[in-house]
Image (cartoon, rainbow, N blue to C red):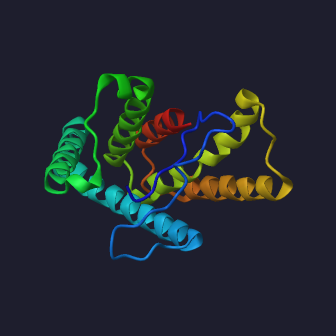
Amino acid sequence: RYLRVRPIFAQPGEVDHYSELTSPPGSKALNGTAEIVFGVVLFSICSSSLLVINKVAMCLVPNAPLILFCQLLSTSVAVRVLRVARPEMDIELLTWSKAKPFAITPLLFYLGLLTTNEALKYVNVETTIVARSCSPLAVAFLEPAVLGSALPSFAGFSMLCLIAAGATFYVAVDEGFRIEGYMWLTLYLGVIV
């Protein structure tokens, strides 16, 4: 129990036991900003290295479902081993009653990985990164339409236009342009948005 996040559906006036940051014995707690920066850097390293590893794997074994199965299986085994080796980590087993409300999330996660891996058969890692950077474009305009939130500010809209211009320029000069790869990346954007 190192970081607990308050449940989304907490009742007003409910005592908030979840927002405390607790540290393992003998360690220092990170302050809020350092923790966020650490999380962003760690996520960036994991995400970029996963793309490179998947590109190499797709070149060696061009079977995206098999590669994803091996990755997800090894992750499940690692978590299970951690649960046995370090019981103080409070890793709960999955039960259908807990997993059912979130069942769509792992399916969309898998489809996002599958479409990315399929795209990596045809395009390079840089093209995949450019396509991923376009997801805020769709979210910025679909979120107000679906959820009724505000449109991006002028500064936000300007940055979105810069992203769109950069992506358009990249596609125009992409020497390795393959329609199959861009089709998979379009499917990825549809799944992730």
Q: Residue 175 versus residue 28: which sits nearer the camera? A: 28
- Which residue is at 37% across, 61% downward? 46
The residue at the point 24 percent across, 49 percent down is 58
Q: Quadrant of the C terminus?
A: top right
- Left-right relation of 101 to 156: left
Q: Where residue 51 sits: x, y (%)?
A: 35, 56
The foreground one among 42 and 139 is 42
Judging depth in this view, the residue of 32 and 36 nearest the camera is 32
Residue name at image x 51 percent, y 69 percent:
35
State the residue at coordinates (19%, 38%): 66
**Vertical comparison of 82 with 114: above or below:** below
Task: Find the residue positioned furthest to the right.
Answer: 154
Q: Quadrant of residue 117?
A: top left
Residue 81 image position (x, y, % from top left): 14, 51
**121 to the left or right of 35:** left
Picture quarter with the N terminus: bottom left
Tell me residue 164's x, y (percent).
67, 52
User: Which is nearer the eye, 18 or 124?
Assistant: 18
Percent x, y of residue 67: 21, 43
